[in-house]
Amino acid sequence: MNRTRSTGRSSPLGATPAEGAANFSLYSRAATGVDLLLFDRDDDAVPSRVIRLDPRSQRTYHYWHAQVDGVQPGQLYGYRVHGPANPTHGLRFDPDKLLLDPYGRGVAIPTGYSREAASQPGDNTAAAMKSVVVDPAVYDWHGDLPLRRPASHTIIYEMHVRGFTRHPSSGLSETLRGSYAGLVEKIPYLQQLGVTAVELLPVFQFDSGDAPPGRSNYWGYSPVSFFAPHVAYSSRGTPQGAIDEFRDMVKALHRAGIEVILDVVFNHTAEGNEHGPTLCFRGVDNPTYYMLEGGGERYANYTGCGNTFNANHPVVRRLIVDSLRYWVEHFHVDGFRFDLASILSRDPSGRPLPNPPVLWDIETDPALAGTKLIAEAWDAGGLYQVGSFIGDAWREWNGRFRDNVRDFFRGEPGAVRRIADGMVGSPELYGHKQREAEQSVNFVTCHDGFTLNDLVSYNAKHNEANGEENQDGADDNRSWNCGAEGPTPDPAVQRLRNRQAKNLITATMLSLGTPMLLMGDEMRRTQRGNNNAYCQDNELSWFDWGNVKTHADLHRFVKLLCARRATRDAEHELRRTSIGLRLREAKLQWHGVRLRQPDWGDSSRSIALGGELARERLAFHFILNAYWEPLAFDLPTPGASRWRRWIDTARESPDDIMPWDEAPEVLGDSYPASDHSVVVLFASSEPS
């Protein structure tokens, strides 16, 4: 790597500015030539300078490199890569296409960006995205660092940066709506709600044009860069502005005690299948970056999105780990949720590996130590690893918890045993690992599927607005409309839906594990039955702030649950630790309507759980009644104190949940639990 100033160096990859110049390095094994193009503006059809790299002096191994004088941060650039065009053998070089740098730290989008131009023969320079030279060290963090909050005191709020503040009801200016800066303005809301971490849907630069005609990709699971923040989420509208504004957001969230977890997509890219656009990886080194089939002619599709990233190739492994390090070191993020993470356990031919190198690289990297790692432990190719994901550091989205809680509260036969297992940390899934209960990320709703409101309002998906004749999205929703499909004026149905929403949230928040809430579930955000709103960048998906008042009772209910689930008050840490943490230490006893007589049969629709914490002199009794009639549950004697009613979801607000120190006493030796309700009682001789 000892080269003269003009030839540059093979390391580091990407564009690295230093001393009035920048070093450029690109990996391409099969390329026969590489051109580096510099641009003055993002929509330029003609570059201001073309630097043809000399394969004799500017290629080391498979790395093409050059050091260019006069290049400063903010410089736009791209590559043209020459080589054989032999798609039947996996080689898709096309020197007519301007390519992004796989290690580009910023991305500029021209006004006339065209995904179609990148998919068709011919020069697409004017309509192509360009990479941007960035100096990531130029920022004052004012001492900020990742928070490292314990998992046992974590409540995750899955949210969309744009959707959170884009709605006119947000009260923000047009400039701030839908931006990183707009999210900062709403941090007090997140604090008052009581969540301790936000899990942001993808913020890596993505192709919003990867969607059906006339629609846009809203969710962002269509990446084109693993290092650059999405420019459209910046109120400043420039690549460097997006970088700084994202860091301002992280810094502000940390000041508020809220961690930042990124939903990252390393399983596929926006380039799609063999008919898709050539934006970056396909034209740089197709066989390295993608899993190929049919001798290389077709893309393996374990993602449902047309292609599959070749994550266990050494070069791709390095890119993934370098990306994660970059976001931790230069953006101070606290964790990552890996979309379709099971794909990262497949070898280049698609076979699952017992010890996937990339997953061990991530887990053992010292720069990532202490970072929260969350796996969506399945993929679209049928691999399902919930309960068996590799390693020691990984937490998992518990899809079985979601399904079991939904089944129980809609009255499915045989669901009692399964919800009981989920409430105590899913030992049937995780018991063999001897891991803490927080390995399980418990949720009943997420971006993918029904919102909480729609889960209790629709029996079937209604995705007609997506333009795919309602064929997209999951059919297995395990939902119940409570007696009417969609909106209804029937007050009885509305009351039941509200109760069911509280039941589902209560089960999620009080079960052992790390709870996760979906943005807007606390105020019954609806997508009108659409369970796959990935292409709906409109009021169907956005957070309507007016509903915070419309559904103030549910909003209050969730706030009080969060306040009790986790506390930020270190002075009262031992006495006011989380309900979930207490459950783990408790001596538990299962009950039915009769004490110590749980009904585990398929026809059972109810269960009760009791326990005591001698050290804290606290007893608790949970009652879950999914039966369609009221049931009277016997209560054990709580000792010298009396039972107090904290939660009864069948009661109207504010009696549905009480502040802990205002909970009323319960008289008698039984409790009448209404149909479709959850009751939580406690007895304590300690002050609250």
Image: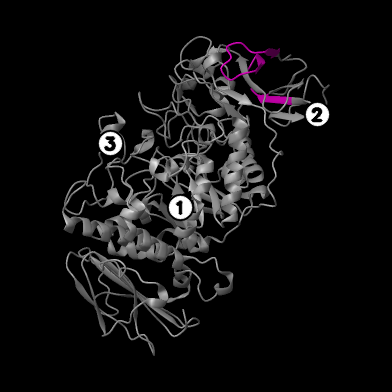
Pick whichever of labels 1 and 2 is earlier in the sequence: 2
Pick whichever of labels 2 and 3 is earlier in the sequence: 2
Q: Nearer the viewer, mark 2 or mark 3?
A: 2
Three-letter code, disc 2: Glu
> Can residue 252 be seen at all in this image of the molecule?
yes
**Rendering coords of residue 167 (x, y %):** 39, 41
Give the alpha-carbon distance from disc 2 to disc 3, as whole Å.
54 Å
Nearest to the observer: residue 560 or residue 156: 560
Q: Residues within 10 Å of mark 3 (few under 14, many from 20)?
A: many
Residue occupying the point 25% across, 61% down: 414
Pick whichever of labels 1 and 3 is earlier in the sequence: 1
Location of residue 418 by image quarter? bottom left
Q: Residues within 10 Å of mark 1 (few under 14, many from 20)?
A: many
> Can residue 411 be seen at all in this image of the molecule?
no
Give the left or right position of residue 546, taking residue 374 as reference. left
Q: Which range of residues does the magenta coloring cover? A: 23-51
Nearest to the observer: residue 405 or residue 254: 254
SS under mark 2: loop
Location of residue 139 by image quarter? top right
Give the alpha-carbon distance from disc 1 to disc 2, as whole Å.
43 Å
Q: Which residue is mark 2?
A: 19
Residue occupying the point 56% across, 49% down: 335
Residue occupying the point 47% across, 19% down: 114
SS under mark 3: loop
Give the left or right position of residue 363, taking residue 55 as reference. left
The image shows residue 322, relative to residue 675, as above or below, that is above
Three-letter code, disc 3: Asn
**Rendering coords of residue 317 (x, y %):** 60, 37
Three-letter code, disc 1: Tyr
SS under mark 1: strand
**Rendering coords of residue 511 (x, y %):** 40, 64
Q: Which residue is mark 1?
A: 157
